Each structure stands twice: as C-alpha cells, then as structure tokens.
C-alpha cells in the first residue's frame, strides 16, 4: 500500500524526531510548518496503516514496519541530497529542498543509478 508524498513526509519527520528526542503532534507541527489538525489527520492515517503507535495527546512511535518505511524514505533523501551536492555542486539548502521533492518520485532504477554513480565518485 503506497503512501502519498505528504504522508511520507510525516513518516520521515517522525523517524527524524525519534532520533532527536520525542515526536509529538506539536514537534511535528513545528518541524513540518503545518497546523496541528493536519498533523493529527496524517498520524491517524499512519496509525490506521500500522506505521505508528500514538498516545492520545502524547508521544508518537514508529512500528517495525513504520521504521523500515521511514528509514527507506530517509535513505533516499540522503542519497539524492549527497548526489546533488557532491556531483552537481548544488548548495546544501537547495539540495535538501530538491531531495525532499525528488525522494517521492524517482524510480528504483534512477535511485540505483544515482547510488552506483555516487559510489564510483568516491
């Protein structure tokens, strides 16, 4: 079952916030610059798909399948950002924004080619 780009962004944000501290509705709202009702709606979607567990008015945690999916999204982001900065010379800020958009739409073939090309450059 595929996720929308927006839902993938929420999942990735939960993953990053878990690594930094405590993912909450407020923390997600601040990180993604969206209103709290939008966060609650997205978390309900992720919870229904069993990607997260959430306490009422509390902490959000990734399930095992949620962690795998979020890590895959994050890894795509890092791969693309590194390609954009190291190979194309794009600034960190722009590469981060572009990677965030591209991580959702590139095919597995394109990602494999980028990974292979980047490895060859090291």
Image (cartoon, rainbow, N blue to C red):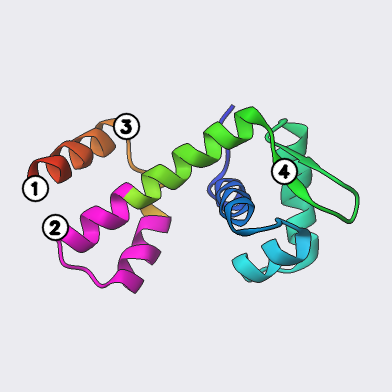
Does the residue at mark 2 contact the one at mark 1 (Cβ under 8 Å)? yes
Q: Note whether 57 is above or below 103 in the view shown.
A: below
The numbered dot on residue 17 is: none
Q: Nearer the viewer, mark 2 or mark 4?
A: 4
**Horizontal side of residue 32 vs 23, given as left or right:** left
The answer for how far apart the CA atoms under marks 4 and 3 are is: 27 Å
The numbered dot on residue 61 is: 4
Q: Nearer the viewer, mark 3 or mark 1?
A: 1
Residue that carries the numbered disc 3 in the rendered image: 108
Residue that carries the numbered disc 2 in the rendered image: 87
The answer for how far apart the CA atoms under marks 3 and 1 are is: 20 Å
The answer for how far apart the CA atoms under marks 4 and 1 are is: 37 Å
Residue that carries the numbered disc 1 in the rendered image: 121
Q: Residue at (74%, 69%) from the top-left corner?
A: 35
Does the residue at mark 4 contact the one at mark 1 (Cβ under 8 Å)? no
Q: Secondary structure at mark 4?
A: strand
Could you tell which of marks 4 and 1 lies nearer the N-terminus? 4
* Residue 104 in view (yes/no): no
Q: For residue 90: magenta?
A: yes
Q: For residue 104: magenta?
A: no
The answer for how far apart the CA atoms under marks 2 and 1 are is: 8 Å
Q: Residue at (56%, 54%) from the top-left corner?
A: 16
């Amino acid at each position: 079952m595929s996720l929308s780009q927006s839902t993938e962004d929420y999942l990735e944000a939960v993953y990053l916030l878990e690594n930094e501290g405590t993912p909450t509705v407020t923390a997600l709202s601040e990180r993604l610059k969206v209103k709290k009702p939008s966060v609650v709606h997205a978390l309900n979607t992720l919870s229904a798909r069993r990607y997260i567990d959430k306490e009422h008015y509390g902490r959000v945690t990734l399930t095992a399948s949620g962690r795998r999916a979020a890590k895959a999204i994050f890894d795509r982001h890092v791969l693309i950002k590194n390609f954009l900065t190291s190979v194309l010379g794009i600034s960190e800020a722009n590469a981060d924004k572009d990677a965030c958009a591209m991580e959702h739409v590139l095919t597995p073939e394109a990602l494999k080619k980028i990974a292979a090309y980047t490895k060859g450059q090291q």
